[in-house]
Image: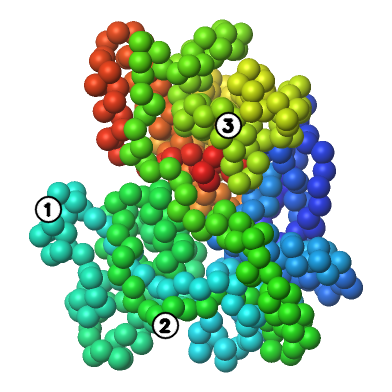
Amino acid sequence: MRFCLRPYLTLAIFSIPFLFLGCGSDSKSVETGQDSTDTTIAYMPFTMKRGTLHVLMDNNVASYYILKGQPRGFDYEILKWYCKDHGLNLEIDVIPNFDYILDSLTAGKGDLAAGNLTITGERLRKVQFSTPLHYTRQVLVQRITPEARRSRSKRKEWLVDHVLELEGRTIHVNRTSSFAERLYNIVRENGIQMDIVEVPADVGYTRLIEMVSEGDIDLTVADENIARLHRAYYSNLDINTPISLTQAIAWAIPPDRDSLKMSINNWLATKTTSARYNIIYNKYFSNSIRNSRESIREIQDGRISSYDEMIKERAQDMGWDWRLVAALIHQESRFNANAKSPFGATGLMQVMPATGERFGVSPSELHIPAQNLQAGTGFLLWLEDYWKRKMEDSTDIKKFILASYNVGLGHVIDARNLAIKYNLEPDVWYDNVEVMLKNKMLPKYYNDPVVDHGYCRGSEPYHYVRNILEIYQYYREFTDHNSTLEDLADLSTRPTLMGNVGVGKLDE
């Protein structure tokens, strides 16, 4: 799938069969993961087409992104549903600079704009909005320091519990966001003074939330549904202080497109209370990622799981340490053979149906441990074969394989290309390629010409690889009789940030 972002990208979305990379292929049309639905990028200026809904979107976790070769996102899935019901093709233009999405819409660049857009008075001067898709409120995102975590008095002293306590504080927000508009209203309404730092559009809310977690900044603002999603990744965040009343999230429509607005509103009136709509919403916004401190599976009688012998047999055929495969399975399903994700990934290794079929396992068999292991380990070996052909130094090959299994091969290839461009080591994972994969959350990097697969929630594979290797180390220590059950159980209190998070994986 070629994915070179330009100021506007027209995406013609259609399904093609799963494609494996041929030996020695230098093509940039790459299968990026399990159960891929390819998204072809057509390089053309915007033109209105009969039977086509042309949507301007932000490339982010809430609205639209590509992962494992599949288009994802709440707005994307609802729009796809609308288009199907109305016999329309869906074309998406990703707007690299979100500052200009409404200006682009009013300039005739699209029929509709989507991207977790809050209805505000300022925006209503430019565009009209659909019936609300859902409701949220703006909340402060602030870091819980280690001291505040240990002491209730320190927590109360450090955390902002009310908007009036923002007096004298510094808060970073995007300059054209509804958050900035709300903060200035708070200043006017309450007569308090705060330092509102307006960051450029290419520093999105994902990066600002991460900067709060890492201690680079103290405060930012996010919509509560988005903040909950990120708190599952960053357990040191507090998002309990609202700064607004409930606000509506909707699609923006040009002021002269009343017929489109009526069509969308009539359709939404019949859908927003449906079970299918709620399933889609919960898939993206419910805080369903496993608690990062969930206890590692209890080990009895020197066994990691009831599947140890089966895992050992498959790992021996692969030439892998069976404990590394077991660590991956722990990360994927917590050894639950009946686990199934909202995206259809199934079983111990959370295998997608199409991936299973390509390794000789039908969808109906994926809940069977032996067949699931056959498909999952087959996919690992396919990834290993690819990276062996691409890496001059294969020391870190397992890390590249794990990341590819989680987030898709294409995104890891992108990160490696970025590492080359920024003079990092393309065959070294820690502090090199993993950094560039994490950077793919930022427009500067996912819009780079060397990137073919666009936005990536890079913090997920970043922590996914680290978590698996940490679990693997504990499994090694335990099975080598160098640690006790109590030592191994200590893993449950270590500050791992991720549960199980790959697209098509359990509890995404």
* Label 3 element class: loop
Relative to residue 390, is residue 259 depicted above or below? below
* Label 2 element class: helix
* Label 1 element class: loop
Q: Which numbered circle lies on residue 151? A: 1
Q: Which residue is mark 3?
A: 338
Residue 428 shows in the view:
no
Residue 209 shows in the view:
yes
Q: Amino acid at mark 2?
A: Glu
Q: Residue at x 26, y 28 (%)?
A: 490
Residue 403 versus residue 427: which sits nearer the camera?
Answer: 403
Q: Which residue is mark 2?
A: 181
Residue 159 versus residue 295: which sits nearer the camera?
Answer: 295
Query: Horizontal and vertical percent for residue 304?
Result: 41, 17
Between marks 1 and 2, how big is the CA–CA gap? 34 Å
Precedes in sequence: disc 1 or disc 2? 1
Relative to residue 257, is residue 361 depicted above or below? above
Q: Quadrant of the N terminus?
A: top right
Q: Nearer the viewer, mark 3 or mark 1?
A: 3
